[in-house]
Amino acid sequence: MDALLEILGLLLIWRVTLALVLAVSCAFGLATHVESFTAGYAVLMSFAGLLAGLVWEGQREEGS
């Protein structure tokens, strides 16, 4: 339960949210227009966006 709350807390950070929203938007567009782009690929793309946001935020914190 604590891990879930930590993930929800990360969504309050704009860098993580921006990366996730962009990844989900791209995944949704690809899933609706490209027949071979399945839901599994969309989920993986969303996780990749979340990871990119976490790396972006981590590098910002490391630099300050």
Image (cartoon, grey):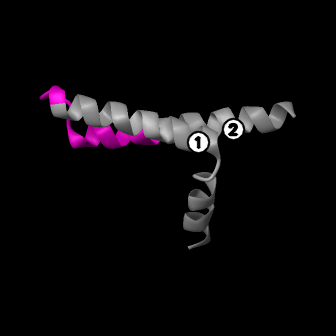
Neighbours of disc 1 within 10 Å: few (<14), some (14-19), many (20+): many
Q: Nearer the viewer, residue 49 or 25?
A: 25
**Which amino acid type is marked by label 2?**
Glu
Q: Nearer the viewer, residue 21 or 41?
A: 21
Task: Identify the element where label 2 is drawn.
Answer: helix
Q: Is residue 36 shown in magenta?
A: yes
| Main secondary-structure element of the magenta-colored stretch | helix
Q: Alpha carbon of mark 1 to alpha carbon of mark 2: how far?
A: 7 Å
Taking the spot 20% from the left edge, 31% from the top edge, the residue there is 37
User: Seen in the image, is 25 located left or right of residue 10?
Assistant: left
**Which amino acid type is marked by label 1?**
Val
What x and y, as percent, mark residue 41? 29, 36
Q: Is 55 rendered above or below residue 9?
A: above
Does the CB distance between marks 1 and 2 fall below 8 Å? yes
The image's mark for residue 31 is none
* Image quadrant where residue 16 sits: top right
Q: Earlier in the sequence, mark 1 or mark 2?
A: 1
Say which residue label 2 marks: 57
User: Seen in the image, is 55 located left or right of residue 46?
Assistant: right
What x and y, as percent, mark residue 24? 38, 39
Q: Is 8 rendered above or below residue 16?
A: below
Taking the spot 62% from the left edge, 53% from the top edge, the residue there is 12
Q: Which residues are magenta?
A: 33-47
Q: Quadrant of the N terminus?
A: bottom right
Say which residue label 1 marks: 16
